[in-house]
Amino acid sequence: MDVSFILITLLIGAAATYFAGNKWASKVALLFSVVAFAVTLYTVNLLNNGENVSFLKNWIRNPRITFNLIGDGLSLIMVLLTTSLTAIIILATLKNTFKNAKSFYALILFMAFAMVGTFLSADGFLYYIFWELSLIPIYFIALIWGGGEAEARKKDVIKFFIYTFAGSLFMLVAFIYLYQKTGSFANGAFTRINLTDKEQFWIFLAFFLAYAIKIPIIPFHTWQANVYQKAPSAGTMLLSGIMLKMAIYSIIRWQLPIAPAPAKEYMNVLIILCVAGVIYGSILALKQQDLKKLLAYSSLAHVGLIAAGAYTLTLDGLRGAVLQMIAHGFVVVGLFYAAEIIIRRYNTTEISEMGGIRIQTPRFTSMFMILVLASVALPATFNFIGEFELLYSLAQTNVWIAVLGGTTIILGAFYMLRMFQQVMLGEQNAKPFADVTFGEGFAFVAIIGVLLFFGLYPKPIIDFITPALENTLNLINR
Amino acid sequence: MENILQQIGIENYIYLSTLLFCVGVFGVLFRRNAIVMFMSIEIMLNAVNLLLVAFSTYHQDAAGQVFVFFSMAVAAAEVAVGLAILVAIYRNLNNIDIDSLKKLKG
Amino acid sequence: METKLALLLLLAPFIGFLINVFAGKKLSGNLPGILGTVAVATSFAVTLSFFLQVSSSKEPVMIDLFEWMQLKNFKVNIAFQLDQLSLLWLMFVTGIGTLIHMYSISYMHDDENVHKFFAYLNLFVFFMITLVMGSNLLIMFIGWEGVGLCSYLLIGFWYKNHDYNDAAKKAFIMNRIGDLGFLIGIFILGYLFHSLDYTDIRTAIESGKHIDPTWASIAALCLFIGACGKSAQIPLYTWLPDAMAGPTPVSALIHAATMVTAGIFMITRLNYLFDLAPEVQNIIAIVGAVTSLIAASIGLVQNDIKKVLAYSTVSQLGLMFLALGLGAYQIAVFHVITHAFFKACLFLGSGSVIHAMHGEQDMRYMGGLRKVMKVTFITFLISTLAISGLPPFSGFFSKDEILMTAFHHNKPLWVIGSVASIMTAFYMFRLLYLTFYKDFRGTEEQKKHLHESPGLITFPLIVLATLALVGGAISLPGNSWLNEYLAPVIAKQSEHHHMGTTEYMLMGVAIIGAFIGIGLAYAKYIKQSSVPGQDSEITGFAKVLYNKFYVDEIYTALIVKPIYALGSFFKNVTEAAISGLIFGLGKLANVLGTEGKTLQNGSIGFYLFAFVLGICSIIVYIFLAK
Amino acid sequence: MLTVFYILSAITLGTAFLTILSKNPIHSAIYLVLCFFSIAGHYLLFNAQFLAIVHIIVYSGAIMILMLFTIMLMNLNKEDEQNKSVLTRVAAAIALGLVAFILLATFIKAQPVIESYQVSGQDYQSIKVLGKVLLNEYMVPFEFASVLLLVSMIGAVLLSKKEHINS
């Protein structure tokens, strides 16, 4: 048993879903996502027992490309995040009816497949293929099943596609250059060669463009809010919950170990850029009238902090980044799910048309409240662990940057509570709002359970990822 | 027999063929008549041929002259096809003014 | 066994919370309230046993559960510490908590969401216990933010009213500003000491290890900012008066007796750190004194009974911070305890009054309640005397100690504190007179319904009034049980004031001051029977005071508005500019294509020229340009 | 000999210019034939008789006749060509100067080392030798040249055939 089984499960799942027909598609997809999750858990267990779960097969001889999948703490925790969130996302969409559901669910599973592939790849070429492959399903999901006016949606989605695609082409150039130098696409080979500072700088920049657009870091973020708003909620969850983590993961796995010198030299610039995104996103979130856009900007703020932590090049920063990626993945999926429930009931994304929901829905309110609180990193939620480590790492670098980054604590509370107040509180809304059903609530319970459990006892995850991060750190400081 | 190059010098041939080539270029740019342009191209080809022969003599190597044969064959083929194309054009447009051939505008 | 007991102490309110959240709706009548009260009472009982154990053994109980967080230099465990300080705090948190829960059963029993109320209240007690019990700063931070959350939930308990929601939000956000300071302080401490455990930090300081004094001062300052947020000091105090939007028991428990004293707890907890930073202590003292004066002056003219009490709370907290700043931690703690007694009593009393008045909080429509509400009146009177600082009530001892210390260290601060005390005496008696004396000024309808509150309400009042009466006994001048009890947790021993002439004179001055305040109130509200006029009639400086020095308006203009303006700027200008730039790149490609298309104009002659030029440049590049 | 070379060169360049400058395509063609003859003269100077003969046969005989036929076929033997714009003509002249300058500059800059010419006495350009070289070393290109000619013949026939769109 090695990590390739996860990929195979998802790929078979995508095919099976497609052939299951519209009626059964969602159930088959759910089944396979749960199976994939179980397989991942089993693999994690194997790794914990000290077994080697990596996978290596020669693929193409010339150019030398191998089918190399790496299974260490870092990649597997991300795969675990992907498979668990995929299951939750599919669960969350069960209530919706989509036209051509078989394609929709098949695309979701296919996207999960591509993202898992991205996390697992240890070969640059393979990694690039998976990286680009993941873009295709989300493009169709957002384009075909999205909301809003068709023309505007098309424009935004195509902008997103071209934008991210253009960014990753620079990454491809970097890979080809590295291949010229090493004669191999293997991650290990890349991190072993000695590049001059100038070469490292250009490679770093090429990677940075790809990742900065995907994360997104300001000023490369303009695609984000519109796509989050227009995509169907499942697509938004996939994008914000997992896909942008691909980029942060890639920073830790590829960018920093391959080109550490510029990361050290320009550390302050990078961190300030990321932290500026935190403040910028938070302040913009304050002004949003659209629920999904507000969440999009809050996501911008949070991932800015995560990226800043990763760029501190400290163990705390990297670990905080990984922990916060997981925490943010769950919380943002939960928040978008809550938004989806409200939008499904009220058929609008305008905050001004909501309000007075709490009085009708005690259960939903409590769950939403917990998610909001987790999102503002209340202690004893998982997000606090991540945010604390991130801010701590920033404070070790420079206290003032930590203060600036810490404004997310204030501003985050400001816009989230403001949103919560406007959406949920107040006199009873004229439009009826049914409380969540058991099926709807289950996804919430799962998310909240994860957030609270690991908020108090994050040790399993910390122990799981720390060796891999220490390796990365050794490579960075080689 | 005394060799010609001892009396004339290779550089004179180089100058000659350069100038001849330039005349050909000038002709191609200067005229609108496609047939005259063809002729200019022939002039350029001949300039090159001349140079090839001159160097063939200089190196006392037959390969240069052999190459000129091939070049002639190619020139003949080119003229045959080119003129056929011109005829076809003439049939359609009733002239062979190259400035009237602007259908391939971007 | 100790671990289990401590966990019971901690988790009993949490279990109460869980039951009330999940099953509260199905529980009928007073059951949710009784459940909540029992949960807190359990904690109180356990606390009492620990208290007795630790006071005799003098050994703190340490409980280490499991590893929580891992940082490069150190680990943070979920661990608890029951020492003299935390037990003292737990005593009055759970004790007063129990009383207020009991009170709430009656006070809230008409509310449809009563189970939620008790759930939140239990949750608050749980977090407060966490805050107090934690053995490191991060556990304290869990509690710290947790009580902030509960405060938010309880202030906005009546969530249909957006004003209340705004007040709740304001409280949470203002607290968060302080929390950021707290967090930064934690970061610096982690950097300095490689640990966040109190014991480790104390050992490191006392072992004389060299610690960068600048960073230590900055850390202390940051922590103080955190304390400012939670304990409502300048400049972060404005949330507390607004927080009175919550139900009265909440104001009593959270916004008077327990949560707002968390800042004092934290500074006392880390007294050895603050001793390292005398300049920060100075700042604390000055902030405390100024806060007490300003809050007291605002309190002079407020008409809402709870608002007066809120400002008085801010003012008293300021006095406590004054004591902290002067390094007199025991005295600050002493005042926290006495204040908890009398202020809880005052709030509960005002709740009783509001209950009787059917929700009316404006003192201008009260009066003469003395005749109907005997118990409430007497308990209220005792507490008022206590807060005004008249012997032998508890407030006298604690307040006098603070002023005495101030006199010894810093005369201007003593003056400020004394003036604040006189004001306190004035506005408290103004409150008392307006509410309980003279004739009733409300509607006939209200008058008919005036009644003494039921036993569940009066019982806590009586208990608290008794404590307010005798609470001073724990630290009598010259023979202080409290000082001895707290000695192990406070690094610097407080200097013993020799009870000489100066001291007695100071006491006399304080008492005279109190009498002046009372006399002024008496002259104005009993003799002249004056009743504060309508809002529009207030003029001059009183208007400035009535509008709280316009601090809220200034904050709005200076901070909130600019942030929104910045948001608009970002939204309308920056976003458009950046996205325009990106679109511009796309447009550029488009334009280049369109324009470049015309280069392909179909003219063979033109192509030939280009061709010749190209050849020329290639030749030049290859052969000539070297 | 130098005199002969100069005369021949003058004829070559002069007729080449006249080819380009004469308005009537027929005149152009005739000047071009003259030009080709002078080039054949150059070949003779090199003592490359076979090449000179082939040159005359192919160029003056085949190619130029083909051109003349075409001109007559199209009835172009009149001076009806519109001149290019002045701008184009000036540009063409400039291009002429530019190309000439660049080529000559290249040549001069290259500073070729012209060794004193050694006569080895080896025969390298008699018909016999050329034939051997052509059919030994360059056999394959030679055959391909024939294929090329065949293909171009077919192409020419196909292109010049009248299209019958409806058939």
Image: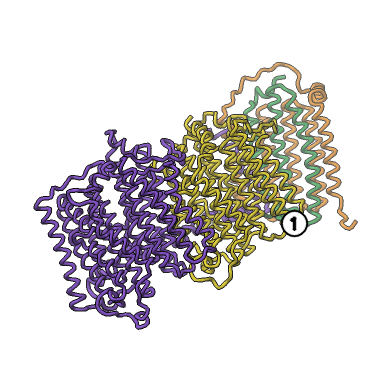
Chain colours: A yellow, B green, C purple, D orange
Q: Secondary structure at mark 1?
A: helix
Q: Is residue A459 left or right of residue C317?
A: right
Q: Is residue C473 left or right of residue B90?
A: left
Q: Is residue A436 left or right of residue A204?
A: right
Question: Residue at left 17%, top 64%?
Answer: C514
Return the chain for callout 1: A
Report the amino acid beneath label 1.
Asn
Asked whether residue A26 is in view, the answer is: yes
Residue C395 placement (x, y as % from top left) = 23, 58
Residue D82 placement (x, y as % from top left) = 69, 56
Question: In the image shown, does C28 or A227 lie closer to the viewer?
Answer: C28
Q: Name above or below for residue A263 compared with residue A95.
A: above
Q: Which residue is mark 1?
A: A22
Residue A341 lies in quadrant:
bottom right
Residue C506 lies in quadrant:
bottom left
Residue A400 placement (x, y as % from top left) = 36, 46
Question: In the image shown, does A49 or B49 lie closer to the viewer?
Answer: A49
Q: Name above or below for residue C377 compared with residue D167.
A: below
Question: Residue at left 29%, top 78%?
Answer: C534
Residue C174 placement (x, y as % from top left) = 37, 58
How packed mark 1 is, by other alpha carbons closer than 10 Å (few <14, some 14-19, many 20 or more), is some
